[in-house]
Structures are given as C-alpha cells and as structure tokens.
Image: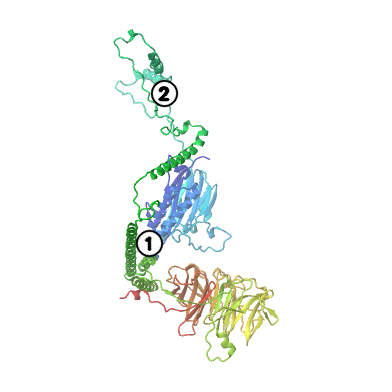
Amino acid sequence: MQPLELQTGQRVAVAGTILNNSARTLVVTPVLHQPVAITRGQLLVLCEPVGPTERAEHACRIVTKTIRQTFYESDATSAASALRLAIVAANKALYQDNMRCAPDRRITVGVTAAALLGNDLFIAQVQPAQLFLRTGNTLRAIPTHPSWDPAQVNVAHVALTGALGASLFVEPEFFRAVVQPGDALLLSSSALVTRFDPPTMAALLASGDTAAILDAAYERASELAAIELLALTFKTPQPQPVAPPPPAPARRLANWFRRAPDLPAHQPTPAPDSLAAPPPQPTFSPNPLPRPAPIDLGEPLAERVAQRATPLPPSSTLGEDPPRLPIDLGDTLTDARPYGLRQLVRPPSTMTWRERLAWPWFALNDIVREWRRERQLRRKSLTVSSYVPRGRGLTYRRTAPPFPWQLLLITVLVVAGAVVYGMNLSQRNNLQLATEYLVAAEERVAAVRTAPNEVAAREALQIAQQAIEAARASAEITVTNPGLWLRFGELEREYERLLAAVDRVSFLEPVVLARHPLPNGVFTTVIVPPALSGVSDPNRLEIVRYLYALDSDRDAARLYRIPRDGGPPEPYLEPGQPVGAAIVGSLRAALWRIDQVVAIDQAPNGFGYYFRQNDTWNYSKLGSSEIWPTPERLDVEEYAGNLYVWGAQAGEVLKFASGRYGDTPEFWLNPGVTRDAAVLSAIDMAVDGSIYLLQTNGTVLVFSFGQLVGQIVPANVSPLITEVTRFVITGAPDAGFIFMLEPANERILQLDKRTGALIQQLRVRADGEINLSQLTALSVDTSGARPVIYFASGNVIARAELPPPPRSFRDEAQP
C-alpha cells in the first residue's frame, strides 16, 4: 500500500472558551530516522475528564504524558500491545494521584488513543469517549450509541464506571482498521454523538477538510460545558521535486566558452553547489605498493658457530681477539631425584590427549609421595635422642608433658565473659530499638488527635497502624518485659478508640458456641429463638433452650440444634428421616415462626414445609412447588404467620397465607417491578411489614404493597463496600437497624434503617481464633437488656454482645 500523509486539527473548549495548547489532546509524529517510528508509528490521544473542572487539565496532562512515554519506551512487540501498556500505566498514575486528594476532588478520565502505522490504524478506548471513522464510504461510531441503532428503543446513557483513575484495574477496548487516502477520523467527547445523526456525520467526514469538520462539530456542541475535538484526514503525500544532475565539467566549460562573449565582463562566476556535486574521486592507484625486500642477515647463527669451532690458520687471528663460545642458557636441572622435577611443567597446548588425561593422576601421586616423605622425616625427628626429664616410677615409660589446665581455664573464662558481654550489649540494643519503635508509634497515634479533618485523620491513622505493626514485630515487647508490654497495650487501646472514632470501627469479643461436626461442614443459617415470657408449656420451654443451625450441604443438608450456652451440635431434622407419610429431603431453608422453628426441604415431588406439634414433626407440601426450578439459594421469611419466598421464581416474591401453605401462593410484586434489572439481581430478602431486597453493592430496595417506594444507600463507609452477601433487619418498620455481612473486608456493617448512615463497623482482632472472612449467617437477639449477635463463619458459630456505637471523630477530638 502507498504511504499516507496525516492532516490533523484539534479544538478544545471549556465553558465557551477555546483553550490553546490544552493537555486534553496529543498528536505525536516521531522523526523518520528514529527506530521507534518503524515499530510504533504516529500517536493520537484525546482525553475526556469527568470531575472537578479545576483539576481537569492536571489529570489530562498526567494521562497524556504517561501514554506518550510508555507507548514509545516500553518493550512491547506491537503497536496494539504498546497502547494497552500505555493506558494501564496512565490509569495507575492517575489513580495514585487521586489517592492523594480528598474524595470530592478526585477525577476520572475517558481516553481514546490511536496509533497509525503505515495504513493500519490501531484504536484503544476507555469510556467515556467517542470516535467517528469513515473508511471506504462506510461510517462507524465507536462505541455505537443506542440512538444510532434502529433496533434499540432505549436511548438512555449507559453507566460508565471503568474510566481511568476510578480503580487500580482497567481494560481498554481495542479496534483495528485499514485506512486509505480520502478517509477521515474524528475523536470527540462522548456527548457529541447525540448532536449528529449518521447521514450528517458521514457527509461531514466525506468533505476531507479538518477545519470544516471542527467548525461544524463545535457549532453543534457549543452549548456543552466542555467539548474536545481532534480531526484527522488521510491523503497521498505529494512527490518531492528532484534536482537535475549537474552537467559534466568538460561540457560546462565548453558551454561557458560558448556563452562567454554574451556575459557581462563584471559578472562573477557562480560557486559550485557542494550538495549537488558528486564526491571527489580517489587519487590513489588501486594497485598495491610493492613490498620491501627482506634484510639479508647472512648465514644462520648455528652455521657461524660451527664454522668458528673449526681450527683457523694463525694468520686469520692476527691482531684480533680470540673467538668466544656461545653461552648455554638452557635448564641446568637434571631429572635425577631428589633435585630434578617430578613432572616437567608443560603448557596444556603442547600436551597430547593422553598426557592431559594422565596429568591429574600424576599430580595426585606427587601429593601422596610428598605426604609420605614428610611423615617419614617427622618420625626420624622424633627418634632423635634428647634429654627428657622423667619423674618417679619406672624409667622405661615415657612421661607426657603436663596438661595446661590453667591456660584452658583462662581461655574458657575469657570466652564466656565475651559471650555474656555480647548478649547484654545485644539485649540493650534491642531494648533501645523497641523503645524507639514504641515512641514513634505513640507519636503517630497522637498525630491523629490533632488532624484538622476526617480525611487527614484517616491518613494519619494508616501511618499509625504501620508504626504499631513495626512495634508489635519487636521481640522485646512481650509479657516478660512488663514496662514495654503495658505501654504497648495502652497504645493499642488508644488506636482502637481512634479507629472507632474515625472509621467507626468496633471490635467484638466473640465466644465460640459450637463447631460443625463434619470436617468440611459450613453453617449457612443461625436461628435464635426470642425470649418467651409467661410460657409454661414444657415443649415450648424446651425449644427456647437451644439454637438452631442449617448447614450448606446441597444434597444432604441437616438442621442441627445447639445448647444456648454452647455445646456439640446434634441433628434435629435430617434427610431420609420419615415424617408421617413423607421422607425428608435435602433441607433448603429454616426460620423461626411465631413460637417454633420450621424447615423447608426439596423432595422429588416438590418443596415441603415441616413444623413441630408437641414433640413430633409434621409435614405439609407447599402449593405449586413441584413446578419450581432448582434455585441456587432459597430465602424464606416470615411475617404475621405468612411465608414469603424469594428465589423460587426469578424476580418475584411468593406469599403463602398463614395456615394455608398447601394452597397456590400469590405473587406479591407487581408485574412491572419484576422486570427491573435491580430486582432480578437481588441476592437476599428481609421482611418487617415492608419487603427489602439487597444488592451486592449494599443498596437496599424497599417495597410496599408490591411497589418500589425507596432505596437505602450506605453512606460514610470507609473502606468502600466491595461485596455484601447477606443482611438482617431489626426493629419496627419505622425504626431499627440493618446488619450487612461483607466477608471480603471481614466486617459486619450496622446501618440506620431510615437513612442508611453508618452506625459502626464490627470486626474481630487479628490475634483471635475467629476470623470473619467466611461469614455466612447472622442473627440478632434484641430481647435482652443489650443486643446480642450470633454469627456463623465457616464451621464456627459464635456469640458476642453488640458494642455501643462509637462517638464521632469530632467528639473524640475535643480535649
């Protein structure tokens, strides 16, 4: 394909004012002699900031600078992979910049990045962003807006939550196109697509004039608060004129002589063009220079010596010195032992392969021989007669020299003293280092009190946590060191008070009541009977003395009962147990109804309802349950004796009237509500006169008489909610609390039922035997003087008193 020439034009306007040199657009054309231009190509970037206007240029500058640097300097093997690495790096840089700002000053950026390499156009996009591409009389909008698609009936904007800077992870969408001369490209803000229809945009891009494209687009979107435009057209490059070759010197000289009479006498001769003239030709001959004749040194030295060794006539030496014999500079050492070399040292290059293989054995033989010789010499030296003082006794026995006990004792004492001194010195150093860690942690905790606002207090609290962890890792802060241990305990209590004041975190003191009898068993439901006053029936009193728990085995789930003060669980209702004419199937739900515990099972012929009468189980089949699909989770709640079932039919709540569970249930929600996406995505249900449906992000939908009357959104929760799994509603319809389980962040959230304001976050300490990473069930007993919560985490059921709500940071900061 023929190369393309890129013509660009850009325009950025904010509040009706056109910005020059704005950081929201970037066009980079690398120099042709640079190697990166061959593998990357030209780079085009357009940013659309979403957030505070005063930080828009700063955020776009971070994004464009990072994309440009990473695109041209990364080790990617293709332009598409370089675009992805550049956008991921820009998202990380913007996210880190947002974390340094207050939440209300954080900003996100949508970006469209394109790389033109030859005739290939690679596009990477993170919404909010918009791109219009006209190739081969075909117009395409990326992304395709619902108003441009005739099959769409909903033109509402799609919620965009994946812009740069919103989270630490981002994944751009990629597109590729082959462009030809006459094609056009327009990068713009996401709102521009609603100002054009496809025929108008196709006619605009077909003009091929970047200025006209920018003017028309800006005219239609001038009322927007901010508009970013970047137009490109592709054309065939114009051929560059080639200079004619200079005439030959002889012909030029002849022409000069021929035209010389016509030229003025005073006209100077023009200087030759050094760039157009050919390089000078070499003046040397291609034939090599002749080599010099070698120096004649006469006869060889050996022949001269041999000649001089022969007797000469006396006349030849008259008046001359006598001839000197050559000096022998050879090795004077012979091979005779012990003065000769055992093995002649020869360079490895002169050895044969046999000599190289035998050389290690020769060296080992020499070492053994030397060791034997030294041993023999030592023995001979010991046999030399010398005067040895002998004590009393037999004179023919040798007496050993006395053992140096004094020297040994002194050595042991010196070494022991050095070891004790080193241990004391090391202990003092460790104690001083632990004290410094503890002082630094106390200073960090004290800095939280003086923070000007909650954001600064939260940052100071994180720094204090790191200092406390460093002090906790010290080996000197233990129970054996009471001074440091008491200071560290008081520091931890102060940190917990500040944590409760800033992030409204309270710590539970759980007591383990029971563990699942099976190795991998998990409890999914905990039922706590309320206190019954004025009841004398022994059967009812027996029921109140226990807790009830349902496990998670889908094929053989059992209902256990546990003593209220703790103890081993015992099966209370299990699959295969006969109840009248029915056989119990796998239990799917259990709940407290008025004065007894009831259970729902799944059998081949439908779902059954089991309840206690006196001391025996009774059975009733739920009406029309044989046509229910197999739900992932069946949630059954009770209110005023009625049963409400969620999960049996998608997006619908089934209501069984009190005492008529065998009849066909009625649909509680209105038909228009059941098709709502928010209702279909609900994961849990609660009933207190109204019906509450829980979303995974913590939002609670409130329904009354089958209609959606409001929603409760959690507020002031830090860190933000990742994913909640279950929730519990307490109190009357117009008062009470909402308790949400969030295993991902290992916490239980207590919210106000009316406003959604955070009351407190319930956690457990890291050094305890229970963790909240596997929270599955929660029950709140409000019948006593203080509320008590019972929760299941994995195979453990625990009980803890509900702590009082912590005071706000403003109240704690008062002296």
- Residue at the disc numbered 1: 100
Residue 111 visible in this rendered orientation of the protein: yes
Position in image of residue 717 (x %, y %): 43, 70
Q: In which quarter of the image is residue 814?
A: bottom left
Residue 237 visible in this rendered orientation of the protein: no
Considering every residue shown, the one lying at the far front of the view is: 394
Relative depth, front residue between 801 and 244: 801
- From the viewer's perspective, is residue 586 above or below residue 118? below
- From the viewer's perspective, is residue 209 above or below residue 316? below
Q: Is residue 414 left or right of residue 368?
A: left
Q: Categorize mark 1 by other alpha carbons within 10 Å: few (<14), some (14-19), many (20+).
A: few
Q: Categorize mark 2 by other alpha carbons within 10 Å: few (<14), some (14-19), many (20+).
A: few
Q: Residue drawn at (42%, 34%), measured in percent from left and top? A: 338
Position in image of residue 354 (x %, y %): 52, 34
Kind of residue at disc 2: Pro
Distance CA(mark 2)–CA(mark 1):
71 Å
Q: Do the residues labelled 2 and 1 touch (CB within 8 Å)?
A: no
Position in image of residue 756 (x %, y %): 45, 75
Relative depth, front residue between 661 and 465: 465
Position in image of residue 560 (x %, y %): 59, 78
In what element is the residue under mark 1?
Answer: loop
In what element is the residue under mark 2?
Answer: loop
Q: Residue drawn at (55%, 64%), measured in percent from left and top? A: 154
Q: Quadrant of the C terminus?
A: bottom left
Kind of residue at disc 1: Arg
Camera-nearest label, 2 or 1: 1
- Badge number at residue 59: none
Considering every residue shown, the one lying at the far top of the view is: 315
- Badge number at residue 247: 2
N-term mark: 2 or 1: 1
Considering every residue shown, the one lying at the far right of the view is: 581
